[in-house]
Amino acid sequence: MSSHTQVPGNGSAALLQRWESASIDTVWLRPGDWYTPAAEALAEALDARLDTAPAAYRLGQARSGAGVGITEAIDDMAVLFKAAGFESAPIRSIRALCEGWTAGSEPILEAPTMTDAESGLGTPEYLVQRLAEVYGMASRGGVEVTSTHALVMVDVSVEATDPWQRIARNAAAGEALRGAYGVGHPMARMGDGLYAVLVERGASLGQGIASLRDHISDRAQAMKGGNLMRQPPRVWIESLPTTHAFASDLVESLQR
């Protein structure tokens, strides 16, 4: 047992100081906004060998509220666990940090079961539900969904990455897609680094895809997530079938 666990309170304060100093020296961009009570709570939980996931979630919320990017927040938390003598942060706490960051960055309007925790986008089930609404409206209006809507598929995956990088990639890509389309637009994570966006067909669809590809690349660089994502991202149009039942099968086939 390390010496800093012997005296409650004193050890966590020392750990907090080591964490702040090391983070500012290595990964933190703006030293003046590093401290938050949530960071202190996480250091106390780790020092006491308690479950760090709840405190990591609150830290994610605080970092998001302060405008800190997801990759910077993850890198910062990694510094804490290394300062405490661990090889890396546990995946459960990384996931909690990302969930808190997502919850703090955008209001989640869907039911929790319809929201993907890593990206903050919808789940495939959510996309199927939104497609049911589109097919229902098309049927009532006497039009074919095949001619009015399509799925834009976005693939930013890269090979040979660990769970840490996967979580950061999905969070950063979710932020980029919300920035491109806006909150509430039908989007879903289909797998690691693979996303589907329900769009209306039109003359500008092709130009919009080119703009989307550039936007994701720009956002990835701005969020320091360029090494996490395929550059440039692969973007293509997936045509929708004639019925909602077939569309549900399509969504299932696209998952990975």
Image (cartoon, rainbow, N blue to C red):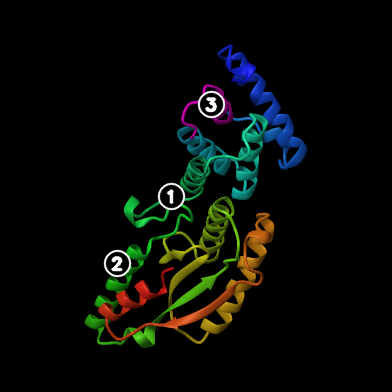
Q: Give the CA distance from mark 1 to mark 2.
A: 20 Å
Q: Is 88 placed above or below 143 here?
A: above
Q: How many marks?
A: 3
- The disc, 3 or 2, on the residue closer to the chain's N-terminal end is 3
Residue in view at x 40 percent, y 51 percent = 108
- Residue beneath disc 1: 107
- Residue beneath disc 2: 129
Question: Residue 173: image x %, image y %?
Answer: 55, 61
Residue in view at x 65 percent, y 44 percent = 75
Q: Amino acid at mark 2?
A: Gln
Q: Give the CA distance from mark 3 to mark 2.
A: 39 Å
**Tags 3 and 1 touching, CB below 8 Å:** no
Could you tell me if residue 67 is visible in this image?
Answer: no
Q: Is 186 placed above or below 65 here?
A: below
Could you tell me if residue 75 is visible in this image?
Answer: yes
- The disc, 3 or 1, on the residue closer to the chain's N-terminal end is 3
Crowding at label 3, few (<14), some or many (≥20) Cα neighbours within 10 Å? some
Is 85 in the magenta? Answer: no
Q: Which residues are magenta?
A: 37-52
Front position among marks 1 and 2: 2
